[in-house]
Image (cartoon, rainbow, N blue to C red):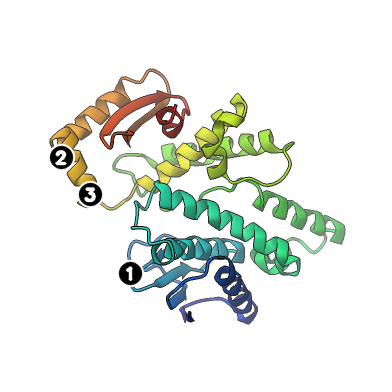
Amino acid sequence: MEVKVKHIKCDMNTKDRELMNKFMKFLQKHYPLKNDITVIFTGERFGDMTTGSRTSNSELKILTKGRLNRDISRTLAHEWVHEWQRITKGKKRGPDIGGENEDEANAEAGSIIKKFEKSNPKEEEMMYEGINNKIKLLNESILLTEKLNIRNNFLTEMKKIGIEKLPYSYSAMNQFVDPETMDIHYNKHYKGYVKKLNDALSNKKGEVELEDIIKNISKYDTKVRNNAGGAFNHALFWKMLSPKKQLPKGEILNQIKKDFGNVKKMKEEFNLAAKDRFGSGWAWLYLDKGGKLKIMSLPNQDLIMVFHHQ
């Protein structure tokens, strides 16, 4: 196979590009593809893409602007795994949020990054280059040892369960959620769950991805379960919101019509489930084991996938 690389309004320097080339060779070794692909590193978004997207003609588009090399690599690995699923494993494209394919891509992307870093320890500085740039902006009066401590603290934080970036501004949903409420839920509640989760995991050996915790949640205690649920549910929630009006279409629309009659009735039932929840919690539209769409409300930060598989 051949990997073609393009750079469009991309701010990556020569060393950044060399690192990405090395990482792509690593991906080829672990996730070999049967077809040629084109990887486009871009400084601007295409269409509705957030940090990455791919097309049916095997083009992987990766956003680079303002991002650490580690984050760029993870996005590249995520989209590469999706291409590997489609071409090598013959899987049909699944939903962009949730589903077996997306879960596998998230888990494998996290895993491949850690394998690459472990196999290439000399590349650590380049993977976290943005952090080093921030350190250079600190006051020159800070002692060298303090600078090194700050750098190491940054690296430690980056290797914990990460914070998902809010994919729009705090005021983007102003018609439904005012900026202050969005700010509180993102910066106080969501980030609070992630911090408490990392604290709860601090004594456990090795690194673990949030998706892996969710898949094996029964193995963890109540503190991990509650905070992992809060972190995962909120991270999923941000991705489901959009400042642009969108309507159900395709397979999901057909399933809604089949199980509820029409979208209006589904919304009414969904809103009722949310309003009837006493205290905090979540309303869920989910597919049961029999392939039927149903609506359920769960308290606090309980996970729908955990309940559904019990």
> Mark 3 is on which residue type?
Glu
Which residue shows up at 62% across the image and 79% down it? 18
Q: Secondary structure at mark 2?
A: helix
Q: Secondary structure at mark 3?
A: helix
Which residue shows up at 43% across the image and 78% down it? 36
Count neighbours of disc 1 (C-alpha within 10 A) and say few if under 14, some if 14 to 19, many if 20 or more.
few
Dot 3 or dot 1: first in sequence order is: 1
* Disc 2 target residue: 257
Count neighbours of disc 3 (C-alpha within 10 A) and say few if under 14, some if 14 to 19, many if 20 or more.
few
Q: Secondary structure at mark 1?
A: loop
**Spatial separation of the CA atoms under disc 2 and disc 3:** 10 Å
Numbered tag placed on residue 245 in the rendering: none
When asked about the image quadrant of residue 142, the answer is bottom right
Q: Is residue 108 above or below residue 235?
A: below
Say which of 22 and 72 sits in front: 22
Give percent across and percent down for residue 45.
40, 67
Residue 198 visible somewhere in the drawing:
yes
Dot 2 or dot 1: first in sequence order is: 1
Say which of 81 and 253 sits in front: 81
Residue 166 visible somewhere in the drawing:
no
Q: Is residue 29 above or below residue 2?
A: above
Please state, as top left, top right, bottom left or bottom right, where the C terminus lies in the image.
Answer: top left
* Disc 1 target residue: 56
**Spatial separation of the CA atoms under disc 2 and disc 1:** 28 Å
Left or right? Give the position of 56 relative to 206.
Answer: left
> Mark 2 is on which residue type?
Lys
Give percent across and percent down for residue 279.
41, 19
* Disc 3 target residue: 251
When asked about the image quadrant of residue 181, the answer is top left
